[in-house]
Image (cartoon, rainbow, N blue to C red):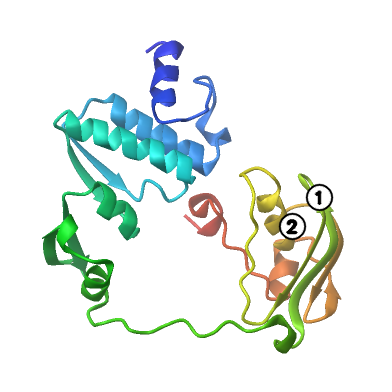
Amino acid sequence: ESPAWVGRQLVTVGADVRPSSRAEDLSIAERQLVEIARALALDSTVLVFDEPTESLTAAESERLFEQIERLRAAGKGIVYISHRFPEVRRIADRITVLRDGEVRGTFDAQDVTEDDVLQLIVGRKVDHVFPEKLRAESAGTYLLETAGLTGGRFSDVDVAIAAGEIVGLAGIEGNGQREFLRSLAGLHPHEGEVRVDGRAVTVRTPAEASGHRLVHLPGDRHAEGIFL
């Protein structure tokens, strides 16, 4: 098909990608959107979506849901696989729960709660609650600190992470969060200080980072997270 036709298919799912781009140069989210655009363009009778929003932003996910509603209105069949119950509840007519390869129940989406589904997935009632979070001042020595960490797309980053804490990096995709994390994993050149358990360390390579018990879980698991 012509580049103009390809461009229209990409716009349909909100993919800001040039038709001449190589897939290997795209981000994980962009590849996901291209996959979805391709599936939609095939005019199939039944479409199977397997964790389609895993790498998508809220806005991209919303665009996908709009297309799924359009397909349903056109009489297409949709199988939507996801562990995100609010998404499933929103778009599904029926929900089927599988555990250990066996069907544990099928329900009208509006007649089942998240607790019901969770109990079927786990096999027992789940009443465990998260423990109270530790206060930074009572957590003791910081496990990880950075001072003035600077690299491509980020600069002068200071963080201090205590035991029991989860620290999130907010911001629009592409504003340096990924590069900052990759620097801590020894995958991205940087300047500044990194301290583990209060001791200054060098993390210029993944081996050095691993030696200091810094483990990186990459966004692109297929390319960087496993040995194929």
Mark 2 near mark 1, Cβ–Cβ under 8 Å? yes
Q: Say whether residue 115 is left or right of residue 143.
A: left
- Count how many numbered circles sit on residues in the image: 2
Judge whether 21 appears above or below 117 on screen: above
> What element does badge 1 sit on?
strand
Residue 216 % position (x, y): 62, 64
* Residue type highlighted by circle 1: Gly
Judge whether 105 appears above or below 82 on screen: below
Residue 89 % position (x, y): 26, 54
Q: Say whether residue 33 is left or right of residue 96.
A: right
Q: Is residue 95 visible?
A: no
- Quadrant position of residue 38: top left
Choose between 76 and 19: the one closer to the eye: 76
Residue 113 % position (x, y): 23, 66
What residue lies at 37% left-to-right and 30% top-to-bottom? Answer: 37
In the displayed orientation, state which residue is furthest to the front.
110
Residue 135 % position (x, y): 67, 83
Q: Which residue position is annotated with label 2?
A: 183
Q: Say whether residue 172 is left or right of residue 114.
A: right
Dot 1 alpha-carbon crowd within 10 angstroms: few under 14, some 14 to 19, many 20 or more: some
What residue lies at 43% left-to-right and 25% top-to-bottom? Answer: 10
Q: Which residue position is annotated with label 1?
A: 151
- The first of marks 2 and 1 along the sequence is 1
